[in-house]
């Protein structure tokens, strides 16, 4: 099993401060960026640490980098939430494959009234369904800029 520091190293080398560009059939361009302050959120650490701001954002990123936050400390904090987030954490290193080969879909919430999704778009890779990967999808909201 990978350590949090190894996952962070992968994130820094492959995703952090990079832009992944997608073009929809309509011609609309979506730029997806990854930042250091988003790392803990992508891992689901906020669920384990119960929204404690000392373990999210850049603070959490630094705690992982200097070894203050590890898989063991997360497991000790909340075993049940840790078990629920463990697959998410270990799957992050496959994200680059989904970004490269996955499909981008627009999600229409008004067509799915019982859905809990609030995102505008999501990325999906067929391997999620076939069982090669047990869980790997990513969703995000589009942020509209004032310049259009």
Image (cartoon, grey):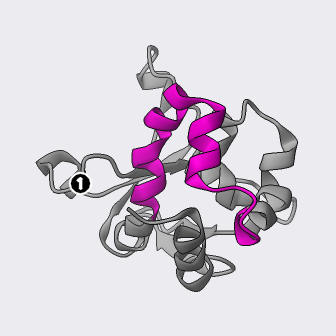
- Comparing 26 with 24, the one in front is 24
Q: Position of residue 17 (x, y in %)?
A: 69, 80
Q: Magenta span: helix, strand or loop, mainly?
A: helix
At x 63%, y 56%, the residue is 70
- Residue 17 within the segment the image draws in magenta: no
Q: Position of residue 79 (x, y in %)?
A: 53, 30
Q: Which residues are magenta?
A: 64-92
Q: In the displayed structure, would residue 138 be above or below residue 14?
A: above
Q: Is residue 48 left or right of residue 108?
A: right
**Any part of residue 47 in sight:** yes
Q: Quadrant of the C terminus?
A: bottom right
How far across and down, in percent of the image, does residue 93 sit? 43, 68
Q: State the image coordinates of residue 127 (x, y, percent, origin top left).
A: 19, 57
Q: Which residue is identified by label 1?
A: 133
Question: Can you tell which quarter of the image residue 13 is in?
Answer: bottom right
Instruction: Report whether 117 appears left or right of 40.
Output: left
Q: How many marks?
A: 1
Query: Residue 135, relative to residue 64: is it above or below?
Result: above
At label 1, counting other C-alpha atoms closer than 10 Å, the crowd grade (few under 14, some 14-19, many 20 or more) is few
Closest to the observer, 138 or 109: 138
């Amino acid at each position: 099993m990978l350590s949090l520091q190894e996952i962070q190293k992968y994130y820094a080398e492959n995703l952090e401060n990079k832009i992944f560009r997608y073009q929809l059939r309509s011609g609309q361009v979506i730029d997806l960026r990854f930042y250091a302050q988003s790392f803990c959120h992508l891992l689901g650490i906020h669920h384990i640490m119960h929204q404690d701001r000392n373990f999210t954002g850049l603070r959490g990123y630094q705690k992982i980098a200097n070894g203050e936050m590890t898989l063991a400390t997360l497991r000790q904090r909340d075993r049940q939430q840790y078990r629920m987030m463990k697959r998410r954490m270990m799957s992050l290193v496959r994200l680059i494959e989904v970004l490269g080969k996955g499909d981008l879909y627009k999600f229409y919430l008004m067509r799915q009234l019982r859905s809990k999704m609030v995102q505008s778009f999501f990325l999906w890779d067929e391997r999620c369904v076939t069982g090669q990967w047990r869980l790997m999808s990513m969703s995000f909201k589009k942020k509209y800029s004032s310049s259009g």
